[in-house]
Image (cartoon, rainbow, N blue to C red):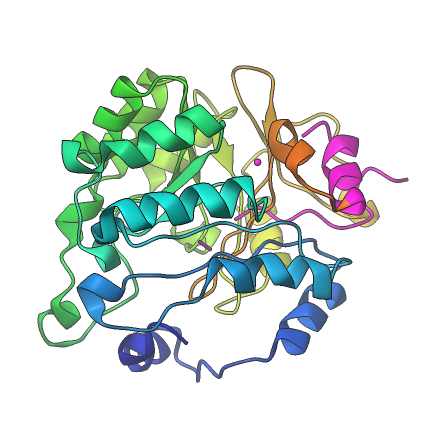
């Protein structure tokens, strides 16, 4: 586990032990929920001194459990400079991972600082999406000084807004509702065509009202739905979405009894599904990137929905099949 010193605070927040699981245990969890998933790596070594979950490990899971894991998300430490750039290109081009996940609070960097622009330029040139944490985090919550983590690194304006403006062909997903800057995030989502949001990490009942309202209005084609495994299950979050009256705006999504999927359609017509989780994050990839994948079942499942973390919405493996 690469965030060991923050686990106790997370256990206090979730009010239950956060026990480590084996690869087989996690795969079985997703099989039980009939869900396809993608793991996301972890590297905040420069800022936290914690260990690394490597991109090779993430890529290897698809080979070990092809019925469960789609090609995952790469993570590199932005403070490792050229070595990180080389690793990111290798992870996407050679390991065939979907895109790059960034954790500004944990990695202690401002994404909009020009020293980090080579990362965004690389992802844009490779056609790889980026998933950037927005708003507060459970990590460090309740610890003295928040465990030394600074929330300001994850403010949508200017951190994400500036990147979206300077790299207009880069697909950016804000991970989580970005509270306490939810309305800033809404402004970026409305203004920038290339920015989306996943609502993972928040039980639907607690999603800020301003965002909940816009999810049924201006942002209905911008939102990716999700859970927060192992904090709570995908089925639990899907049920709460229905209870909260949040609409499923994809007419191709099957009835709940046939296996449910929540999809947010992009303005370009490219549909996206994600599932995000704490600690190891997972996500389903969107179809414009699925050509990188050799996971035929995953491609078929996404394509059947007409459908890109963290960590995001869940898609049952039999969705669209019947």
Q: Where is residue 185 in the image (x, y as percent from the top left)?
A: 28, 33
Return the residue nearer the eye: 59 or 106: 59
Which residue is nearer to you in this view: 212 or 274?
274
Residue 221 visible in the picture: yes
Of all residues shown, which one is farthest toward the right?
A: 322
The magenta stretch is 296-322
Q: In this view, does 201 lie to the left or right of 31?
A: left
Give the image location of residue 214, x and y in percent: 40, 28
Q: In this view, does 114 lie to the left or right of 175?
A: left
Quadrant location of the C terminus in the rendered image: top right
Q: Residue at x 78, y 58 (%)?
A: 67
Is the stretch drawn in magenta largely helix, strand or loop? loop
Q: Position of residue 301 (x, y in %)?
A: 77, 41
Q: Residue at x 43, y 82 (%)?
A: 16
**Residue 149, placed above or below residue 313:** below
Quick check: is 216 in the magenta stretch?
no
Which image quadrant: the N terminus? Answer: bottom left
């Amino acid at each position: 586990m690469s965030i060991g010193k923050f686990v106790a605070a997370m256990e206090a927040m979730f009010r239950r032990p956060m026990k480590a699981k084996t690869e087989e245990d996690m795969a079985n969890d997703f099989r039980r929920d009939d869900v396809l998933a993608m793991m996301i790596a972890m590297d905040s070594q420069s800022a936290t001194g914690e260990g690394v979950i490597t991109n090779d490990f993430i890529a290897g899971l698809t080979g070990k459990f092809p019925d469960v894991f789609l090609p995952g998300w790469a993570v590199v430490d932005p403070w490792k400079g050229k070595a990180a750039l080389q690793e990111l290109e290798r992870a996407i081009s050679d390991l065939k991972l979907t895109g790059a996940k960034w954790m500004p609070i944990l990695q202690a960097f401002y994404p909009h600082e020009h020293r980090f622009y080579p990362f965004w330029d690389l992802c844009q040139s490779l056609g790889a999406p980026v998933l950037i944490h927005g708003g507060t985090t459970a990590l460090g919550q309740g610890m003295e000084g928040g465990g030394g983590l600074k929330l300001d690194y994850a403010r949508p304006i200017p951190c994400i807004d500036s990147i979206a403006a300077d790299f207009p062909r880069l697909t950016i997903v804000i991970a989580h509702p970005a509270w306490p800057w939810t309305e800033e995030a809404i402004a970026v989502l409305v203004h920038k065509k290339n920015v989306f949001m996943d609502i993972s990490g928040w039980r639907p009942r607690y999603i800020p009202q301003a965002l909940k309202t816009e999810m049924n209005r201006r942002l209905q084609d911008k939102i990716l739905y999700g859970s927060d495994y192992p904090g709570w299950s995908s089925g639990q979050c899907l049920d709460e979405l229905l209870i909260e009256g949040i609409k499923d705006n994809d007419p191709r999504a099957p009835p709940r009894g046939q296996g449910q999927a929540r999809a947010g359609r992009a303005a370009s017509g490219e549909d996206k599904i994600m599932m995000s989780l704490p600690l190891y994050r997972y996500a389903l990839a969107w179809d414009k990137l699925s050509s990188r994948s050799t996971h035929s079942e995953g491609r078929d499942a996404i394509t059947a929905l007409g459908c890109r973390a963290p960590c995001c919405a869940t898609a049952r493996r039999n969705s669209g099949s019947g």
